[in-house]
Amino acid sequence: MKLILNLVILSIVVFVISRLWSIRNNFSFDRQIMMPNYSYTDDGNYIFAQGSWISTTDLAEPLQTINFECQKKTMTCISVDSTLSQNNTYLSGHVEYIDIDKWNDEEIVSFPSIFGCVDYTYRIDRKAKTIVSQRTTINTEGTCKAFQKEPIILTLGDGEKRIMMNKGN
């Protein structure tokens, strides 16, 4: 079981690194940035989705692509993202391991993932085939004062829509 999970994680990391390397080698500032459209697959025990986070809130790093996969057997999800900075000068990758609280025929809900000042909770609506993340500020003291107090709702959606939003269209 652990070996399979480690192989899945390794394959995701290799995929992200190869994607980042490809972008690095092919990127020039006069090229249009392309990101994948939203896709969702659910076989009952395994879910895979890819896309970009869409929000009505201005995102600090709006140009990103996400691979999101969940396994019922381990009650975990893995989110792998590649993010391009606002000024298109820094490309980063991130892997997040997410523990699942509830998995049923209608939805999958994560336990909160806490990152310093905020926590993230993920909800997958299996009927609507959507993935939503909610960021909630849990600390507003000291360096956390800069975080907006209202929750931020992110929906995994089409990369092209994310690019149009970033251009202001």
Image (cartoon, rainbow, N blue to C red):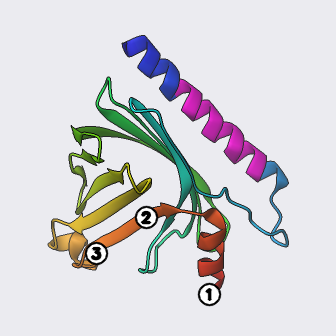
Residue 82 can be seen, yes or no: no
* Mark 2 → mark 1, Cα distance in angstroms: 18 Å
Q: Can you tell which of label 2 and label 1 is closer to the viewer?
A: 2
Write down the residue under mark 1. Answer: 168
Q: CA distance from mark 1 to mark 3?
A: 23 Å
Circles 2 and 3 in contact, beta carbons < 8 Å: no
Q: Residue at x 43, y 64 (%)?
A: 155
The residue labelled by disc 2 is 155
Place residue 19 in its image quadrant.
Answer: top right
**Crowd tier of the residue under label 2, counting other residues whose Cα lies within 10 Å: few below 14, some 14–19, many 20 or above:** some
Which residue does the numbered mark 3 point to in the structure image? 147
- Magenta stretch: give its range: 10-23
Residue name at image x 41 percent, y 80 percent: 57
Q: Secondary structure at mark 3?
A: loop
Q: Amino acid at mark 1?
A: Gly
Label located before the other in sequence (2 or 3): 3
- Secondary structure beneath disc 2? strand
